[in-house]
Amino acid sequence: MRRMTYEQALALALHQEMERDPTVFVYGIGVPDHKRIFGTTNGILEAFGPERCLDTPIAEDSMTGFGLGAAVKGLRPVHVHIRVDFLVLALNQLVNMVSSFNYTAGGKVKVPLTIRAVAGRGWGQGCQHSKTLHSYFAHIPGLKVALPTTPSDAKGLLAAAIRDDDPVLLLEHRWLYWADEEVKAEPYTIPFGQSRKLREGKDITIIGTSWMNIEALKAAEILARRGVDVEVVDPRTIAPLDEEGLLASVLKTGHCIVADNDWSFAGFSAEIAAMISERAFGRLKSPVTRIGFQHVPCPTVRVLENAFYPNAVTIIRAVEQKLGLSPTDLAGEDFYSHERRFKGPF
Amino acid sequence: MSEPGLELYRKLYLIRRAEEAILRYYPEDDMKTPMHMSMGQEAAPAAVCQALGEDAEILCSYRSHAPFLARTGDLDLFFAEMYGKVTGTADGKSGSMHLACPGKGHLCSTAIVGSGLPVAVGAAFANKRLGRSTITCVFFGDGAMDEGAFWESLNAASLFKVPLLFILEDNGLAVHTAKNSRHGYGRIEDVVKAFDCGFYQGSGDDAEALLATVGKAAQDIRAHGHPAFLRVECYRYLEHVGINEDFDAGYRPRSDYDSWLARDAVKLQREKLLARGQGERAQAIETEIDQAVEAAIERAKAASLPDPSRLTHGVFSCAE
Ligand SMILES: Cc1ncc(C[n+]2csc(CCOP(=O)(O)OP(=O)(O)O)c2C)c(N)n1
């Protein structure tokens, strides 16, 4: 075990996979520059050279098609986007080509393409640097979508993505990069479609994605002090989805909140609410509650940004409402502010 | 209108002083918006907006300060938006990266590289169809030329023969990556000339020379009914995003900066005015702008932040 941050865990997984398999290479805009995609490609250029660590023209769609071609012909590309918003330019290749390439070849090829993209937030990221859009990608058959929350999940899921013979998207929240924990230093993979209980509880289930798990854990910690026992379950991959794991938790508690790091309308939270109502209707003590972004583009100015994003307080209020509790006094509570870590443009 | 040389200096100085004020006030941490500074790249926006005046309709990238100020000259809207106030262009929803003021000839700024280009072709198409005298001007960098949208827009504009001026601000860099590791061709001039599109170029150190060149390009657009392309060689003084220098990062030498700074466009224009005996008038412009910048910042600071209920306003068109 070694203490490392999320970004170090990603860099280590990439390094280990590139060492293990010479067909793995990493590419994308700015991948080898001195900022190294927030440190997640640290050491790769030095260890493996420019042939396996490529900068590219700013041409997301074509560079995705390029990755597809290389993947089909025996390499294992890892394509990195510093914002999910830039990956959106590659939707044609992703949705029309990558996702269905194998299907139209009768399942006879391998498309071991990994795509990493960072979801930005805060300090004025605004409407074009803040998207997550995991629901959007998960909507497309033929794509696998992972949303690691913790450093150890980031390491294991990236390694699994690179070893996977199908296209995988790894969506990473910028604020998670600063988290650190003890992580197994040796190579390991985490199988897709296995949720993880981030906190054990019996009163209510919160199914969180990405950053919203951090908010959910904070809410749980505060609610625990008044005897409310919250269970937090992280699906980790939303395609494939661990329906059984999520369902087991909801059947135990009877209450479910989906705290999704995305817009709610027509999104992943709707998918979970539908699945739970289909499979656990008679066992629910309350309807599934959904928490997500306000249904507007992300604004730049802080006061509106604060109104746009849900947080631990949103979750606490939702829990109270579902369980018929009086409002918790939150005066004196210490909530997360990224500005303690960071000021200025990302 | 007074003389072009002075008016040009007014624009150059306004942009420079506004950005210098950002350097001073940004550390107070009240302008929470990522800034891609125009410093060093003032000349092209100033020359284009000066040459075309009210006929210019502009679109630009996140490197929006110079184009916005050159076109609108509106310090109040500018600083209020930087501070995220209700007196800004969009209640602080846009910030620095998405500045827009369609009522004042500034259609949009976009933080998605290259994505303003096709929009400009469409805007120019509409202007032509509706018989307006407007020339659409789209500012972009050498990085945007990597995108398919650039080539598709150049082709469509040439094919549809729209009144559009492409302005390539060629600072040789996309973030930290040099042009020669992104472009698989030689001179863009040779490529553009293969299209039905005029080609012009100039240097970002000499705004007056650029002014004349833009005049020729505009004439070409009007006379031949086709788009024109203006390449302006220039240099970004500061880091890609943020208000600091980054010569220690190792991707470009400080000596490049020194040589550009020696022929800085704002300074050069001032020298020209002095040589013409217009020093006093230049000074009067400076005094006026210095005061205007400080006053605009004061008003922006004093203005209100938007009420959280404004979050949902403006998603769709509204009467207001
Ligand atoms: C589609 C897209 N891809 C990547 C980025 C990240 N990015 C922001 S600016 C930039 C470089 C653009 O360079 P250039 O067009 O030359 O403009 P400059 O910054 O030099 O003004 C990149 C790659 C982005 N904003 N949009």
Image: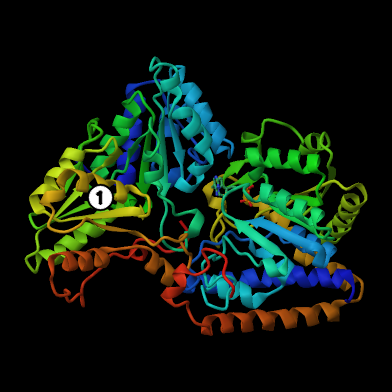
- Residue displayed at 53% across by 27% down: A66
Q: Position of residue B22 (x, y in %)?
A: 58, 70
- Check the image and report above or below for A254 versus B284: above
Question: Which quadrant of the figure has residue A328?
Answer: bottom left
Q: Position of residue A16 (x, y in %)?
A: 31, 29
**In which quadrant of the rendered image does the N terminus of chain B lie?**
bottom right
Question: Which quadrant of the figure has residue B156?
Answer: top right
**In which quadrant of the rendered image does the C terminus of chain B lie?**
bottom right
- Residue displayed at 17% across by 74% down: A327
Residue A123 is left or right of residue A336, and the answer is right
Residue A282 is left or right of residue A88, and the answer is left
- Residue displayed at 51% across by 45% down: A86
The secondary structure type at the circle numbered 1 is: helix
Q: Position of residue A85 (x, y in %)?
A: 48, 48
Q: How many marks?
A: 1
| Residue behind label 1 places its C-beta within 8 angstroms of ligand 1 | no
Give the residue type at disc 1: Ala
Q: Position of residue A68 (x, y in %)?
A: 48, 26
- Check the image and report above or below for A163 versus B236: above
- Nearer-the-camera pick, B251 or A152: A152
- Nearer-the-camera pick, B255 or B285: B285
Residue under label 1: A273
Residue B259 is left or right of residue B319, and the answer is right
Subunit of label 1? A
- Nearer-the-camera pick, A276 or B261: A276
Question: Which quadrant of the figure has residue A236?
Answer: top left
- Check the image and report above or below for B91 versus A102: below
Pointer 1: residues within 10 angstroms few (<14), some, or many (20+)? Answer: some
